Image: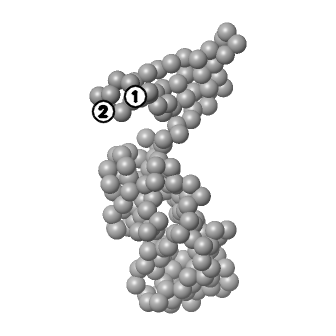
């Protein structure tokens, strides 16, 4: 590991933290992992984070069974830990993660249950009851994850109510806090 101060104009500057792979090759250059600039801003370009959304319009469940919410597009997926095929984020390191899911629902005669899951079990959920017209629903949660824990989002509706999975209305985000 290398901690390097880079002065700017003789005073102030940045503090950079770099590491190398533990492959035993001395000639490999270190990679900067974190930087603190002269204003105190911290950047960590390798910190796992994602923002995903669907590209379809209304999605209507075909049964009252719990189904995974489909996400087909990533605005960003730092580290590629969100799998767009399985619609699941896999934690690359143990730690506390912040997750946020936002969706737009259609009118309901029954209930809709939106859930953020940890290894296919509910970690946080919100139930919305009967309502007319559109409704936005948001779930935010901090979850301690072990390595390879799987985080996803599910939707369940007792009345087969549709929800909107497209970019402007529904999205799922997450990032490692530490």
Q: Image check: 30 left or right of 8?
A: left
Q: Nearer the viewer, residue 126 or 156?
A: 156
Distance in Å between CA atoms under marks 2 and 1: 9 Å
| Quarter holding residue 24 | top left
Classify 99 as above or below 46: below
Pointers 2 and 1 in contact (CB under 8 A)?
yes
Q: Is residue 129 visible?
A: no
Q: Image check: 78 left or right of 133?
A: left
Position of the C terminus, as image quadrant, is top left
The image position of residue 50, as x and y in percent, is: 52, 54
Please report the residue visible at 36 percent of the width from the left and 46 percent of the height from the top.
Answer: 93
Classify 90 as above or below 64: above
Q: Residues within 10 Å of mark 2 (few under 14, many from 20)?
A: few
| Quarter holding residue 9 | top right
Q: Nearer the viewer, residue 172 or 132?
A: 172
Please report the residue visible at 47 percent of the width from the left and 20 percent of the height from the top.
Answer: 3
The image position of residue 99, as x and y in percent, is: 49, 56
Classify 49 as above or below 151: above
Please report the residue visible at 40 percent of the width from the left and 84 percent of the height from the top.
Answer: 65
The residue indicated by pointer 1 is 28
Position of the N terminus, as image quadrant, is top left
Q: Nearer the viewer, residue 107 or 35?
A: 35
The image position of residue 119, as x and y in percent, is: 33, 63
N-term mark: 2 or 1:
2
Instruction: Say what secondary structure mark 2 lies in.
Output: loop
Please report the residue visible at 34 percent of the width from the left and 67 percent of the height from the top.
Answer: 121
The residue indicated by pointer 2 is 23
| Quarter holding residue 63 | bottom left
Residue found at the far left of this picture? 24
Q: Is residue 128 visible?
A: yes
Query: For the image shown, how many numbered marks are present on the structure?
Result: 2
């Amino acid at each position: 590991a290398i901690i390097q101060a880079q002065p700017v104009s003789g005073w102030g500057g940045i503090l950079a933290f770099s590491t190398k792979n533990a492959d035993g090759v001395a000639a490999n250059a270190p990679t900067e992992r974190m930087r603190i600039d002269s204003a105190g801003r911290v950047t960590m370009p390798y910190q796992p984070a994602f923002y995903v959304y669907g590209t379809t319009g209304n999605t209507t469940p075909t049964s009252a069974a719990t189904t995974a919410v489909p996400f087909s597009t990533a605005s960003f997926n730092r580290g590629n830990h969100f799998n767009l095929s399985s619609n699941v984020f896999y934690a690359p390191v143990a730690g506390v993660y912040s997750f946020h899911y936002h969706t737009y629902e259609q009118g309901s005669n029954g209930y809709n249950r939106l859930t953020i899951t940890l290894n296919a079990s509910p970690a946080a959920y919100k139930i919305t009851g009967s309502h007319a017209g559109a409704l936005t629903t948001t779930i935010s949660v901090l979850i301690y994850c072990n390595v390879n824990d799987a985080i996803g989002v599910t939707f369940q509706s007792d009345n087969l109510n549709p929800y909107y999975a497209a970019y402007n209305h529904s999205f799922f985000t997450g990032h490692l806090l530490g």
